[in-house]
Image (cartoon, rainbow, N blue to C red):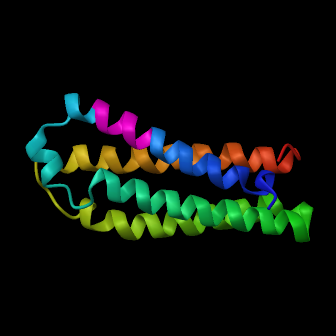
């Protein structure tokens, strides 16, 4: 088994674990407990969802790299657009509620989304630069 082949997927997994630990630690001191208990999507669920989406995207980008190297950037844009559509579908219930916790929950959602977008972008750059 070639472990180098799976290094990007391992990087997403490790980044997700580090992210959830840091996020939960910081949110413990910033977000009131009653807000976090009433979130539509828990922080852990968001991390699992976006980690799975990131794992799929990175896997697909590696497949695209193997078949046609010139289309990795286009594939990244297409997959990221699809991920944004999925994220919007999950975000709609949060947008349509008007409670005191709603701005905090929106911020929580976008922090996780942007965190995984940065990870995917970094790994895509590594795939494009042949450092995998």
Depicted 19 relative to depicted 76: above or below: above
Side (left or right) of 88 relative to 130: left
User: In terms of image quadrants, where is residue 62?
Assistant: bottom right
Quarter placement of the N terminus? bottom right
Residue 7 x %, y %: 72, 50
User: In terms of image quadrants, where is residue 27?
Assistant: top left
Side (left or right) of 33 relative to 83: left
Depicted 48 relative to depicted 114: above or below: below
Dominant secondary structure of the residues highlighted in magenta in the image? helix
Residue 5 x %, y %: 79, 57
Specify start and end residues of the magenta stretch as a single range.
Answer: 19-26
Residue 106 x %, y %: 30, 50
Measuring 14% from the left and 56% from the top, which residue is drawn there? 98
Q: In the image shown, does 40 or 29 lie closer to the viewer?
A: 29
Side (left or right) of 78 relative to 16: right
Residue 112 x %, y %: 42, 47
């Amino acid at each position: 088994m070639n472990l180098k082949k799976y290094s990007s997927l391992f990087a997403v997994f490790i980044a997700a674990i580090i992210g959830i630990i840091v996020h939960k630690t910081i949110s413990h001191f910033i977000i009131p407990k009653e807000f976090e208990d009433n979130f539509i999507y828990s922080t852990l669920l968001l991390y699992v969802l976006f980690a799975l989406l990131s794992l799929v995207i990175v896997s697909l980008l590696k497949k695209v790299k193997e078949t046609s190297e010139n289309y990795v950037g286009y594939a990244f844009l297409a997959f990221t657009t699809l991920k944004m559509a999925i994220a919007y579908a999950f975000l709609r219930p949060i947008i349509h509620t008007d409670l005191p916790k709603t701005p905090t929950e929106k911020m929580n959602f976008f922090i996780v989304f942007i965190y995984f977008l940065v990870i995917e972008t970094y790994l895509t750059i590594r795939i494009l630069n042949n450092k995998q």
